[in-house]
Amino acid sequence: MRNKYLFVSFPVDYGNLVLARNLLVALRSRSDTSHFEFDTGSTLDTSAASQIGVLRRTGRRLRRSLALQMALRTAEQERRVVLFQQVAPAAFSMPVRLRAPSFILLDWTRKLYEPILKKKLSNGVDTFIHRKAMSRVTGVMAFTEAAERSVIKDYGIEAESVFRIPMPFDVERYQMAPARDGKVKLLFVGADFHRKGGDVVLDWFRARGRFRAELTMVTQSDMKVDGVNIIKNKPGEDMAPIYAANDVLVLPTRCDAYPQVVGEAASAGLALATTDTALGAPEVIVQGWNGFIAATENFQGELDSLVSDRSKIEMFKRNSREKMKGFTFKEVACAIDTIVNTTRRNLQ
C-alpha cells in the first residue's frame, strides 16, 4: 500500500523553492501526496525596518499558521504522514496536537552557521522553540551529516530519532558534459556574488587563469569583465545547456548549507571545486575523486593544480555523474518511505 503524505513546504528563498519542487516530484512518483505551501511572506517584503512591512508579515504569518493548522487536521482525518520542510512550519504548527506521524526534513540549522559567521543567529527563545518543534515530531530527516550532528548536539534530539536521507536532484534531466581538449571551461553560479565567492574566482582568473581557462559567471550582479562571459541569473532558468558547456563548477562560497548548484552540476557531469563552508558539499564531493573541498585560503592553489591536469578533470566529470545515481527522485522517495515504514512498525 502506498504511503499518504502531507508535504508542508517553506519557500523562503530560491534554494528552498527548488528543493520543495524536487521533493514534491519525488514523493508524488510513488505516494499519494498533498501539498501545503507555508509561505509567510518573508521574501515578499524587503522593507524589514518599516512598520508597514512588519505588520504585513505578521498578519500573513498568522493567517498562514491558522491555515496550516486546518491542513494538519485534514491530514489526520485522511491518515497522512506529515513532512515539514525545515523547522519553522513545524514550530508554527505547535498549537495543534499532532496525532499523525510527522517528520522535519532539513539541510541546516541556525546553530550550524554560527561558527562560520562568528556570531549568534538564535537566542535562547529561538533555540527553545526549535528544540520543542523537533522533539514533538516523530523524527528528523537530515540531508547532511552536518545538519544531523547539529540536531543531536545543539538541540538535544535523541540520535534514534534523527535519520539521513539524500538530497533530491533531477539527475535524469541533465546530459553528461562532453569530454574536451584545450582550455578548461570554468563555471561560477551565484546570485549573491560576494557570499558565493565570485570575487575569489575573479581574482584567480585575472592573476593566474586568463591564459589557461575560460570563465563563465552566472550571477545577479550587473557587471562587465574583460574576457569573462557574464550571464544575468534568472530564477527558474534552465541551466542544463550552461552546465553542458563547461567542465568545472567553481564555488568558493563563504557560507552555505547545501548549494543546489553543486548537485545540479554534478548531475550534469562537471568536476566540482568548492570550500569547506559549503556544509552540504561532502554529500556530493568525494575529495580527489570527483572534485575538491578546500579551506577558503587554499582554494586558489587547489584550483591552479586542477586546471593544470586535464585528464584529472575528465575523470572527475565521469565520477560526478556516477555519484549522483544515489540522488535521483526514486532513491530519495524510497529512503523517505523506508524511514516512515520502519518508524511506524517500531511505534506499534
Image (cartoon, rainbow, N blue to C red):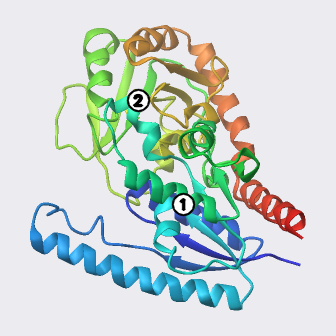
Pointer 2 or 1: first along the chain: 2
Q: In this rendering, is residue 29 above or below 32?
A: above
Circles 2 and 1 in contact, beta carbons < 8 Å: no
In the picture of the structure, the residue carrying the numbered disc 2 is 115
Q: In this rendering, is residue 275 above or below 87?
A: above
Mark 2: few/some/many CA within 10 Å (<14, 14-19, 20+):
few
- Count of residue discs: 2
User: At 17% from the left edge and 43% from the top edge, which residue is drawn?
Assistant: 222
CA gap, disc 2 and disc 1: 23 Å
Q: Position of residue 7 (x, y in %)?
A: 60, 73
Q: What label sits on residue 20 in the rendered view?
A: none
As drawn, is 59 to the left or to the right of 158? Answer: left
User: At 45% from the left edge and 86% from the top edge, which residue is drawn?
Assistant: 67
Disc 1 marks a residue whose amino acid type is: Lys
Q: Position of residue 73 (x, y in %)?
A: 60, 88
Disc 2 marks a residue whose amino acid type is: Pro
Residue 87 seen in render: yes
User: At 62% from the left edge and 15% from the top edge, which residue is drawn?
Assistant: 312
Q: In this rendering, is residue 114 above or below 97?
A: above
SS class of the residue under badge 2? helix
Closer to the camera in the image, 345 or 15: 345
Where is the N terminus found, in terms of image quarters?
Answer: bottom right
Q: In this rendering, is residue 231 above or below 288?
A: below
Residue 253 seen in render: no
Mark 1: few/some/many CA within 10 Å (<14, 14-19, 20+):
some
Q: Position of residue 121 (x, y in %)?
A: 34, 44
SS class of the residue under badge 1? helix
In the picture of the structure, the residue carrying the numbered disc 1 is 132
